[in-house]
Amino acid sequence: MSWLTEDLPGTGGHYKEQPEDFKVEEIPLYPCSGKGEHLYLWIEKEGISTHELLNQLKQGLRINAREIGYAGLKDARARTRQMISVPISAVDRVSGLQLRGARILLSQLHGNKLRLGHLAGNRFTIRLRNCVQNAEQRATVILQRLERQGVPNRFGEQRYGILGNSAVLGRLLLQHQYADFCRELIGDPQRIHNSDWQAAAEAYRQDDFLKCLQRLPQRMRDERRLIRTLVDGRGYQQAALSLPRNLLRLYLSAYQSQLFDQLLEQRLPNLYQLYDGDIAYKHDNGACFRVDSACEEQPRADRFEISPTAALFGFKVLRATGQPGALEEACLTEAKLTFDSWRLEKGLSMQGERRPLRVPLFQPAAKADSQTDIILSFSLPKGSYATSVLLELIK
């Protein structure tokens, strides 16, 4: 892996050893109006995922899942604060609600349901443990560079799933390698720690699908559905495509992310540098445009008004030309894909979009908390990951 701050020594250290080591707080896109048909709940959670929280709210408030709104997903291995909206009809049941691993800090009325992406960004407070000497000084220098030049807009580790193979699954779907997809989904026994899941994966690799189904934990509903299809003799393709569409699209999205990260690596360390044919991103409104003259537009990039982008591939994505376009074409060729490869059946097609290669870093700070630990604080725009900052720091 390359770094934007390749020439600066890192801090070393570890993060997320305990949930309280990694604190995330949403930055709302707008304030609540104080009136309306939706109740916004400001919730702190720890040790549970956002999906687990939503399920508890659905059951505890006796409402439909479609009535609940949220702006983004938050990591289970962290202490997080986020806004959730529920219909005002549930207001009388909120006061008596008992949540596992979460608590409601504040409730306010607003006129519309909260939608995915309706947040300005996230504020992070992170403890790095067991760092090298002078870690505070090293971190400060790196953060200053990132504040000036931007943070590489890499995708976070959570994008790639518990076994880190979500992108592999997406690639196998695109290439219609359904037998390999099924094998990869059940997992490599050597990488699985749960004993029942490990036994199921071993049985799968011996083509004993019935034993695999018997050993798979009940909570692994999607994997059990796939194996049940194979037990019924309906074939690998039908088994793979029997999975929920949103899950399959998640795998395809993970592969989009992996290819984007590859393109980003090729542009390091000069993520601010524009080339003729680039598609540039406007940081004030998210609009994109083609760069006809890099010389004319570069001053805007130097002021961090705009940044070059790379493709999240899809059949309809706005294509770069010139040198940036050649890099993207080569990336697809190496993967044995084309833009039309993302035109899939049964609701799985991916149109694609552009993503900036860098994002701004706000209010960064580092402070020593002991001889070996430092506390980091900073904010990032929505859609970007704190791990991109941590990778530059820890190296």
Image (spheres, helix red, strand yellow):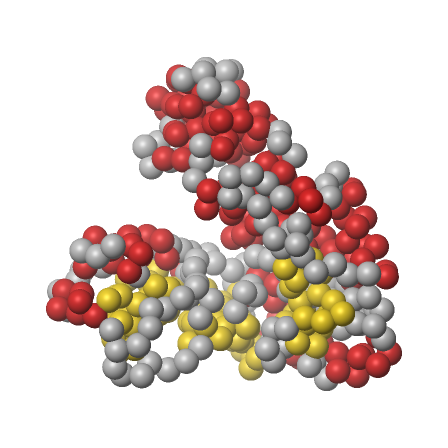
Q: Position of residue 347 (x, y in %)?
A: 51, 44
What residue appears at the point 65 percent right and 34 percent down from the top-left corner? Answer: 175
What residue appears at the point 51 percent right and 60 percent down from the top-left corner? Answer: 15
- Residue 392 visible in the current orientation: no
Quarter of the image containing the N terminus?
Answer: bottom right
- Residue 3 visible in the current orientation: yes
Locate residue 41: give its quadrant. bottom left
User: Which of 160/128 is in front?
Assistant: 160
| Lateral position of residue 7 relative to residue 304, left or right | right
Q: Position of residue 233 (x, y in %)?
A: 45, 16
Q: Position of residue 288 (x, y in %)?
A: 67, 71
User: Which of 207/250 is in front?
Assistant: 250
Locate residue 364: give its quadrant. bottom right
Locate residue 62: give its quadrant. bottom left
Please tell me whether residue 30 is drawn above or below residue 205 in the rendered image: below
User: Which of 9/75 is in front?
Assistant: 75
| Lateral position of residue 173 relative to residue 192, left or right | right
What residue appears at the point 63 percent right and 55 percent down from the top-left corner? Answer: 352
Please tell me whether residue 230 is drawn above or below residue 161 in the rendered image: above
Q: Position of residue 338 (x, y in %)?
A: 73, 44
Q: How many marks?
A: 0
Please tell me whether residue 94 is drawn above or below residue 182 in the rendered image: below
Quarter of the image containing the C terminus?
Answer: bottom right
What residue appears at the point 63 percent right and 77 percent down from the top-left corner? Answer: 283
